[in-house]
Amino acid sequence: MNYTLLIPEIVVFCTGVLCLIIDLFLSERIKKILSWIAIIGLVAGMFALHNISEGLAFGNRTFIVDSFSIYFKYLFLGIGILVIFSSKDYLSNRTTHQAEYYFILLSVVTGTMFMASAGDLIALYVALELLSIGSYVLVAYLRTREGIEGAIKYLLFGAVCSAVLVYGLSIIYGMTGSTELREIGYCLSQQDKQGALLLGLFFTLVGFGFKIACVPFHFWVPEAYQGAPTPITAFLASGSKAASLAVFIRVFIEAFGGIKTEWTMILIVICILTMTIGNLSAIPQTNIKRLLAYSSVSHAGYLLIGLIVGTNQGISSVMFYLAVYALATLGVFTVVAVVANKIGTDEIEGYAGLHKRAPLLSLSMLICLASLAGLPPLAGFIGKFYLFACAVGTGYIYLAILGFLFSTVSVYYYFRILKSIYLGEASDSSKVPTPFFLKAVLIFVMIGLFFMGILPQSLLFSALEAAKLT
Amino acid sequence: MDFSILSWIVFTPLIGTILILFVPREMEKSIKGIALIFSFISLVLALVVYANFDHTIAKMQFVERVPWILTFNINYYLGIDGLNLSIFLLTTFLTFLSIVISCHLKERVKEYFVLFLILETGMLGVFVALDLFLFYVFWEVVLVPMYFLIGVWGGSRRKYAAIKFVLYTVIGSLMMLVGILWVYWTASPHTFDIVELSKSCQFTKEFQCLMFFFFFLGFAVKVPICPFHTWLPDAHVEAPTAASVILAGVLLKMGVYGFLRVSLPMFPEAAIYFSYPLAVLGVINIIYGACTAMAQSDLKKMIAYSSISHMGFCLISMSALTVTGINGAVIQMFTHGAITGSLFMLVGVVYDRAHTREIDKFGGLWHQMPIYTGLMSLSVLASLGLPGLAGFIGEFVCLMGAFISKLAGFKLLTMLSVSGVVITAVYLLWMMERVFWRGLNQKWEHLSDINKRELIATVPIAALIILIGIYPRLLVDLMNVTVIQMVSGIMP
């Protein structure tokens, strides 16, 4: 019973509560301080994480701290910090209810941290719901028409998929008599495969597939991403996806490891569909958030390749890719948020000639989109390289070929944005103001993407270490 | 030499880029000065390498090998041998002169030179990288700067041409990447090291043929080989002058170099198996390129198609797998780069003044621009292979190398290719007549002759063309020993 292992989560959640409480005493003008409190809380969480030892918090596998969960928690805390940075001005221009936003966001981050540590079906599901319900509210937070539409779609779809997930999990429990992932894995490898098992497997896949946003469970993505406040879109695209993949990996490797042949085939089909439909749907989009929504669907497809491979290297490639993908995604959405503050639109034509009005923002967009497209010498290239190298190495050559072909498609629509920014003519040549700290954030993101692209060894090692699930 | 000079040559332009980033965009003269200085430094260092290069041995020289990404046994591995020295030198030379000829640029000067220097780093890196991963990284680095160079400073259809270039190249490169990964996993021990993989001969013939195909897709887009060439006319025409020079003079050579460095040594049996189809494609390039060039009314498009035609010579001689043939391919890479670079620069000169490239709209230009006519005549005569100039050396050695091939069917193909030489002479001389010697079109009375900046850019190349034409040993000696060893590894 080592409750000290829970300190990072406690710190983050208490910061959220603290925001709520302090808000009672703040006047309108200094509400901004809340975001700094939230950031400090997340940084404190990182410190707590730094000194943590490995182990089980409750004596059983409800809450596991191992290198896998620590890697993901660092990722979530980093994502949280960057999301809050881009939320500051975005929120203060649009609403006065900021404390609740930070509270829900920090709770959601706590949820993701619990998800990374969950070794038990119930703990996993509860954490997943903490993430989901918080996300539904955050998507609708600004009460725009689009936001509410997106949130309702997300909520309805999510509720159904959640129910299906629970049904699937209960079938698994019924067949194995345990909710702990390790024991389930052991039981399933002993048993004969029964039809009901496949049903449970399929339902679990539905539930997780929804959260990761892969085809055919992605229909909520365009509206939710487009309607949500841009920092929340960034969080959905990076944090929510990463958390869901962490859970996906744990469940499918630890619990379903013995029945790999059954789920590999289904995953391959889903992966190919996701890469295809995700990339092709992004081509005709004119709204940048919608385009990025479909592109994030396609990235889920690439990530599934790492899961299909299933080896330690495959899992570590997924984790590496998530880190670089999150960094680039947050960079892109930060730029979108700042530009929207000034221009008031998310249409790609609105970005025409941005290079004159905001050179740093344009450069950040260039670097981040090039990383998402997988162009060297940026981190995104190393990520794609690693993923597809694992695919080729385990014999899935056709997946690598398809993945690369669809990456070419993604080059096209990412370059369309860059074309508008760099080759377009601005109708209004006023400067787009960027707060100083956001400039610092964007420079940090760009340097990070270059650094991870040229000297990726440190992150590769961490991912490889973390992929050994204990 | 312990000085790791190759890394310095490759990355000096990048240092120039970083310096330029800190210069305010209004200080255009400083920006141009920095670009000139740093590309000149690369050129000087490359000449130092040339002076210290020992052409009597076939080993890699100036080698730098540092472990880079341990997870995949990737090394930062550079080296020079007979295959890449000449094109490496040419790249530094052409890039410097391209920057000279760009010095009259007025709009978005800072971005232009930043992109140009990044481009130079990428190109130089491709030619000296000896690790497949590093090779691929440099190969792709060239993409984004070229997209912007064409898309921002180009002609009327520049946006279309730029994205076409990018998409074509990316698809090809990604297929090459699949090949790279597959080779890595099949090799034992797993490695990306080009030199190791070339020595080891461990792949089965079927695997070699499959890999040859994947790498072919990547290189074929760049060479370009019909039918993967359709990006070239658009990109070359719409690009600004200096970018066209680099595209034609250097980027096309990356494809041929890829074949010579990667495909032929690593997959020798596949090279023999595919030699005849590859040669046929070469002949198609030569003849189709030449005929299409003849039909063009746009001067730049004509030269673009003539580039396709001339690269066909590289293809046919390379696929012949003889020492003379591969020598010819390397020589033709160098001479064609110089000649086409010169041609595009000179076309840029007249376009800057007349703002048109339509051949039939010109006439009697030699009245107004006699010096220009002289230089253009020199380049055109070199391009059609007049003996005494560099173009003849390239074409002659290529054709001879193809003709003496031990493989079947090459004699016929070589004979067909010679007709390409004739067609080239026809369209080039016809173009010269229409542009320079037909009666003076009154519209062009006011055109000024070539100015100092353009002279500084074009005369050195002209001198090089004459020099290599008269004394080709300067060039051929560099590569002969390396090629002999390379061919002995391929042909039994």
Image (cartoon, coloured by chain):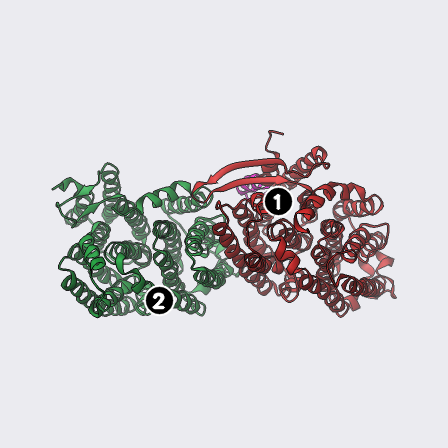
Chain colours: A green, B red
Residue situated in front as seen by the camera: B69 or B103: B69
**Circle 1 sits on which residue?**
B124
The image shows residue A175 at horizontal and vertical percentages of 16, 63
Q: Image point 21% across, 64% down: which residue?
A: A192
Residue count near mark 2 (Cα–Cα under 10 Å), binned few <14, some 14–19, many ≥20:
some
Q: Which residue is mark 2?
A: A270
User: Which secondary structure class fits the magenta region best?
Assistant: helix
Q: Is residue A85 left or right of residue A452?
A: left
User: In the image, is residue B100 above or below residue A203?
Assistant: above
Q: Secondary structure at mark 2?
A: helix
Residue type beneath disc 1: Leu
Callout in the foreground (2, 1): 2
Q: Quadrant of the N terminus of chain A?
A: top left
Q: Which residues are magenta?
A: B13-28
Give yes or no for residue B141 being in the magenta stretch.
Answer: no
Task: Assess whether mark 1 and mark 2 are in contact (beta carbons under 8 angstroms).
Answer: no
Horizontally, is A43 left or right of B56 in the view? left
In the drawing, does residue B409 fall left or right of residue A197? right
